[in-house]
Image: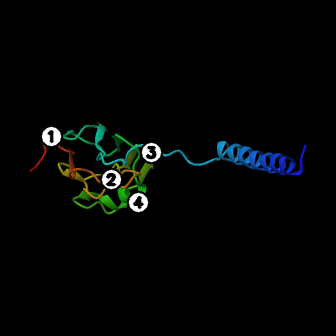
Amino acid sequence: MNYNQYNFNFYFQIFFTFLLLLFIQNCAVIKAPSGGPKDTTPPYIIEIDPPSGSLNYKGEKIILKFSEHMNSKSIEKGIRIFPNITDELPILINGDMVTIDFPNDLDKNQTYVVNLSRNIMDEHGVELADAIFLAYSTGKNISK
């Protein structure tokens, strides 16, 4: 074997080893999945318990089930009750479930409206398509 062929074989082996190491390294790269398309679908309410329009409401929990997980800060800022209730209402957010805990000493024959602002967002920052109004009466009818 002559000297030039020996050099060629040596450099070829180094080059091949380098390519092999590069290939193996790229096969084992750990990275986050690319994901799918960006979420642009507004969240919506799937279920309300008790339903809006309930009469003889005694003050209890109102449970809202949304179509996806919600942003807790936007929920806390985006829920308003009319007329105002003196106590701060406890609001529990657990993924796609939001529980509003009303007091039991509500005024008699009063309609309470829960306003869910359009600024309420899901966990991806997509806002509600429209504001939502839920009415509950402690009497026998909903006043307008």
Instruction: Identify the amino acid type marked 3.
Output: Gly
Which quadrant would the N terminus be assigned to in this image? top right
Which residue is rendered at x = 36% and y = 58% of the image?
A: 74
Q: Nearer the viewer, residue 123 or 13?
A: 13
Instruction: Identify the amino acid type marked 2.
Output: Val
Mark 2 vs 4: CB contact within 8 A: no
The residue labelled by disc 3 is 95
Q: Which mark is residue 63?
A: none
Question: How far apart are the two marked residues, 1 and 3, measured between alpha carbons?
Answer: 34 Å
Question: How far apart are the two marked residues, 1 and 2, measured between alpha carbons?
Answer: 37 Å
Question: How far apart are the two marked residues, 2 and 4, measured between alpha carbons?
Answer: 13 Å
Give the mark, 1 or 4, whose residue is nearer the N terminus: 4
Give the mark, 1 or 3, whose residue is nearer the N terminus: 3
Instruction: Identify the amino acid type marked 4.
Output: Lys
Which residue is rendered at x = 20% and y = 50% of the image?
A: 133
Tell me where residue 115 appears, x and y as whole percent: 24, 54
Q: Which mark is residue 73?
A: 4
In what element is the residue under mark 1? loop
Q: Nearer the viewer, mark 1 or mark 4?
A: 4
Q: Nearer the viewer, mark 1 or mark 3?
A: 3
Tell me the colour scheme of the image.
rainbow
Count neighbours of disc 1 (C-alpha within 10 A) and say few if under 14, some if 14 to 19, many if 20 or more. some
Q: Nearer the viewer, residue 125 or 135?
A: 125
The residue labelled by disc 1 is 140
Give the mark, 2 or 3, whose residue is nearer the N terminus: 3
Q: Residue furthest front?
A: 2
In what element is the residue under mark 4? helix
Give the mark, 4 or 3, whose residue is nearer the N terminus: 4
The residue labelled by disc 2 is 126
Count neighbours of disc 2 (C-alpha within 10 A) and say few if under 14, some if 14 to 19, many if 20 or more. some
